[in-house]
Amino acid sequence: MILSDKRILEEMDKGTIKIVPFQPDCLGSNSYDVHLGKHLATYVDDTLDARKHNTITHFEIPEEGIVLLPHKFYLGVTQEYTETHAHVPFLEGKSSTGRLGIDIHATAGKGDVGFCGNWTLEISVKQPVRVYAGMPVGQLIYFPVDGEVAVKYNSKAGAKYSGQPDKPVESMMWKNKF
């Protein structure tokens, strides 16, 4: 079951969902549109190592936009800061974004109950495409949770991405034991 527009608003009134900034015209019948923030990042090294802390370089999207290239991987961020305290948020690309050949996430489309922060986007493109800060890129969909959550993400001791800032965050895979 997915929350409707009215239910999203009810949950926002209760404080179980927070979206900042919130724009009423971005609320769809069962989702909320999120926008590309002004910060992007790329990894410094061409070859990434899952056991190593791979560093990134941040840069801002200029007013005239920036052309993203295929075969290059970008980390972006949503303009919106969100909190989800009683639902599972899913981030999906908008169809208009997909029709430009832009993928906004490789695998991380699901958040956890208790996620608080801006969403880091894992961006790749099929052909060169100019993007702009503030353009709609995705939509958040909220699912109710069946049962009580024992430990919310923002209270979990090992939560590597809790409180993400308004800049992209690199992979924290290196913090895992394997």
Image (cartoon, rainbow, N blue to C red):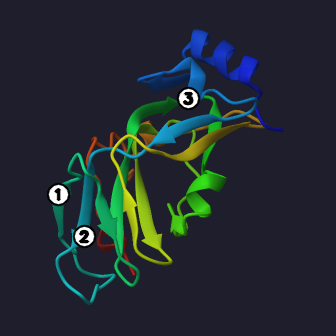
Question: For numbered disc 1, what is the local secondary structure?
Answer: strand
Determine which residue is flagged by label 1: 59
Residue located 46% across and 73% down the image: 125
Q: Residue furthest front?
A: 64
Residue 150 image label: none
Look at mark 3 in the image and give the residue it sits on: 85
Q: Position of residue 143 (x, y in %)?
A: 72, 38
Q: Residue at x 37, y 71 (%)?
A: 176
Front: mark 2 or 3: 2
Task: Name the quadrant of the N terminus.
Answer: top right
Q: Amino acid at mark 1?
A: Phe
Label 2 CA crowd tier, 10 Å (few <14, some 14–19, many 20+): some
Badge 2 marks a residue whose secondary structure is strand
Q: Quadrant of the C terminus?
A: bottom left
Which one is in front, 118 or 144?
118
Amino acid carrying label 3: it is His
Residue toward you, 56 or 100: 100
Q: Are the residues at dot 1 and dot 2 in contact (C-beta closer than 8 Å)?
A: yes
Q: Residues within 10 Å of mark 1 (few under 14, many from 20)?
A: some
Which residue is tagged 2?
Answer: 42
